[in-house]
Amino acid sequence: MLIINLLALAYLLLNLIRRALLTFTPSQSALAWWGSAVNFNDVGQTFLSAIPLPFQFWIKRYLAYFLCLYLASQALQGLLPIPIVVLGLFGTILLLLACIDWFYFLLPNPLTLLLMVTGAFSSIFLFGVEPMNIILRCTACYGVLCAVQGVYYSLRHKAGLGSGDVKLITALACWFDLYQLSFLILFASMIALPFCLLQYRGLRSLLAVVIPFGTFLSLSAIYSAYLFHRDFLMLF
């Protein structure tokens, strides 16, 4: 039963990622984007669209809603561990942020805020972290990053770290402590550097390069969740 529930959860989350990416536009409001993503009508065309399959219209409209109700009932009965759902939502938000930042050099505030809120609740109720600890963590993280951002701008007269990246790292501070967050940022920088070197052969050109650092932060956060919160994976 657990395998079936996990497959249903994976299908639901992947479908959510597909819909969110297909309906995203940088100038669109968060409410309009959400309405487009959860709209009854399917987005995107496939080769099956031209074939009138039995119950295809019903499946397109109500399958996701049925799966939501089914998974909620399974979670209430203890047949779908809540930490697995939380980690699935965590990975979904980060994959969305990674893809959007890669293509648009943008980290939407609603997704970052959602990551922060879910991280705060998860740290308090699942990891047993004190609320004041989370507040101090986020405040210190945001203050230090803003200081680094300001110092770099005063020296180089250009932005070295985007505001979206600062907000994303602050949101990740709700999920990880400062030691884990330091590793996360270091690992993101390590996987971003080869990307820069492959695109720009000379070190001089690196001074002018703009990279979607949020993409690498998101990928590093997914790996860090496996590395530091692997105890939840023992529920399998």
Image (cartoon, helix red, strand yellow):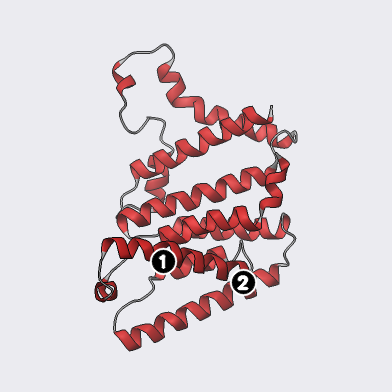
State which tag comes first along the sequence, 1 or 2.
1
In the picture, which quadrant includes the C terminus?
top right
| Up-down relation of residue 130 to residue 25 (above or below) | below
Residue positioned 43% across, 25% down in the render:
60
| Up-down relation of residue 106 to residue 3 (above or below) | below
> Where's residue 63, x and y in %?
50, 26
Residue 110 located left or right of residue 233: left
Secondary structure of the residue carrying numbered label 2: helix
Residue positioned 44% across, 82% down in the render:
148
In this view, the residue farthest toward the top is 54
Residue 123 located left or right of residue 224: right
Residue 197 located left or right of residue 144: left
Residue positioned 61% across, 72% down in the render:
178
Residue to which mark 1 is pinned: 164
> Where's residue 138, x and y in %?
58, 72
In the picture, which quadrant includes the N terminus?
top right
Q: What residue type is labelled 1?
A: Gly
Q: Which amino acid does label 2 sit on?
A: Leu
Residue to which mark 2 is pinned: 178
| Up-down relation of residue 121 to residue 170 (above or below) | above
> Where's residue 83, x and y in %?
67, 46
- Quadrant housing residue 43: top left
Q: How crowded is mark 1: few (under 14 residues within 10 Å), some or many (20 or more)?
A: some
Return the mark for residue 107: none
Q: How crowded is mark 2: few (under 14 residues within 10 Å), some or many (20 or more)?
A: some
User: Cα distance, mark 1 to mark 2?
Assistant: 19 Å
